Image: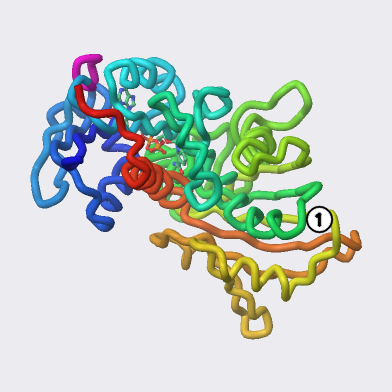
């Protein structure tokens, strides 16, 4: 087919901006590119592929000629726009949580379950950023030795909440270093020089919605309906890249050496694991990279079939924009795009 027409909704956002740069870096083929954001950004000009493109308002008609619609705004916006875009014939790749658990919507990490795209109904979702990097590191191990149980503690960057949260961390840090005080607005508490064990609302069972996503999304992506996941998701004053301390219980014992071998052979995963030389994955090193970095691999001394590890990845790239573009590339490769009407 000829190059697709593409619409990016949320083009001015933390993910949207990175998405445009990755589209250029990967030379994603585009015929016509249209950019949308909230009413306050209409008319703003963004430079993509060497051209200035004006941000437009979203409307049902805008999707008429679109082959791909990347929607990266909010759950509320996605609930409204995703079905409209799909009905107008666009293949929608949705970054929000709105449709991830919908049984008609494939939830895809292309290195793991690209074949799920075959049953698409014009919509695919990307997982939550903390889930994506965890399944990237665990799936190659799970294939060799089924995982029974996962305990995950995350250390999540503020860019996971978007542009406003990044601005809040910058502003609070400046005020506090100048001896002033702060009044939080994005988060319920001060985020600068602090750690918040609270991402998304608390649910009936005491977990947060973010923590529940790590359970249900992992099961769906890995086709492992019985896997148990207990997560504690924590916001830390880091700009980019989520870090995760993950403890895994397998069906049979797995040595750290075997895990390193399996992980090194898996596309998109890099093992950085030489603690004696102070080498382990770091948020600042992962920022700007597409890979998922794994280190601190060791036997879990609390369980004979257990392994512990440290997983780090750029939440805006593999956790969102890169994964979305990889899905589009996979759709094109598998010729799953419906012909333009
Ligand atoms: N950040 C991450 O690491 C990450 C990872 C995975 C998934 N996601 C998901 O990706 C989505 C975007 O997140 P983000 O971090 O990029 O948020 P963000 O920085 O707050 O950006 C939100 C974007 O949505 C636009 N927008 C807001 N209301 C809109 C409307 N009514 N119509 C059209 N566009 C509208 C905003 O436009 P204005 O600039 O005009 O306000 C902006 O471009 C969210 O669904 C999020 O859950 C984020």
Dot 1, how many residues are within 10 Å of its Cα: few (below 14), some (14-19), or many (20+)?
Answer: many
**Number of numbered callouts drawn:** 1
Residue 75 percent across, percent down from the top left: 46, 24
Q: Which residue is mark 1?
A: 250
Q: Is residue 251 magenta?
A: no
**Residue at 47%, 48% in the rendered image:** 110
Q: Nearer the viewer, residue 341 or 206?
A: 341
How far across and how far down the image is residue 276, in percent?
Answer: 68, 84
Q: Nearer the viewer, residue 198 or 105?
A: 105
Q: Is residue 321 visible?
A: no
Q: Is residue 159 left or right of residue 101?
A: left
Q: Is residue 115 above or below residue 98?
A: below
- Specify the quadrant that holds the C terminus: top left
Report the magenta residues as a range: 57-63
**Foreground: 190 or 179?**
190
In this rendering, is residue 341 above or below 34? above
Residue appearing at x 36%, y 41% in the figure: 331
SS at circle 1 = strand
Label 1 C-beta lies within 8 Å of the nearest ligand 1 atom: no
Res. 327 image quadrant:
top left
Q: Which residue sits at x=35%, y=30%?
A: 71
Q: Is residue 341 visible?
A: yes
Residue 265 falls in which quadrant of the image?
Answer: bottom right
Image coords of residue 98 (percent x, y) = 50, 24
């Amino acid at each position: 087919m000829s190059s697709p027409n593409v619409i990016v909704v949320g083009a001015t956002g933390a993910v949207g901006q990175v998405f445009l740069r990755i589209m250029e870096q990967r030379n994603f083929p585009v015929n016509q590119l249209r950019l949308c954001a909230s009413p306050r950004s209409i008319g703003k000009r963004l430079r993509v592929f060497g051209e200035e493109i004006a941000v437009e308002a979203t409307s049902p008609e805008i999707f008429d000629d679109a082959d791909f619609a990347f929607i990266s705004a909010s759950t509320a916006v996605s609930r409204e726009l995703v079905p409209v875009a799909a009905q107008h014939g666009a293949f929608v790749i949705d970054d929000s949580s709105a449709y991830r658990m919908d049984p008609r919507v494939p939830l895809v990490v292309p290195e793991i379950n690209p074949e799920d795209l075959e049953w698409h109904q014009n919509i695919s979702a990307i997982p939550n950023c903390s889930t994506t990097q965890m399944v990237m590191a665990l799936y190659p191990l799970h294939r060799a030795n089924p995982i029974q149980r996962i305990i995950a503690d995350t250390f999540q960057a503020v860019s996971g909440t978007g542009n406003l949260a990044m601005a809040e961390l910058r502003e609070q840090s400046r005020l506090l270093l100048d001896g002033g005080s702060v009044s939080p607005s994005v988060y319920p508490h001060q985020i600068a020089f602090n750690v918040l064990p609270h991402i998304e609302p608390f649910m009936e069972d005491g977990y947060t919605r973010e923590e529940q996503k790590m359970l249900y999304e992992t099961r769906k992506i890995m086709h492992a309906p019985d896997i148990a996941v207990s997560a504690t998701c924590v916001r830390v004053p880091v700009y980019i890249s989520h870090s995760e301390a993950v403890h895994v219980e397998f069906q049979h014992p797995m040595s750290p050496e075997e895990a390193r071998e399996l992980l090194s052979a898996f596309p998109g995963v890099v093992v950085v694991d030489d603690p004696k030389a102070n080498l382990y994955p770091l948020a600042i090193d992962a920022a700007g990279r597409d890979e998922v970095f794994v280190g601190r691999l060791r036997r879990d001394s609390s369980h004979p079939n257990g392994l512990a590890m440290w997983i780090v990845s750029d939440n805006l790239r593999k956790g969102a924009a890169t994964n979305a573009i990889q899905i589009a590339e996979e759709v094109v490769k598998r010729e799953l795009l419906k012909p333009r009407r």
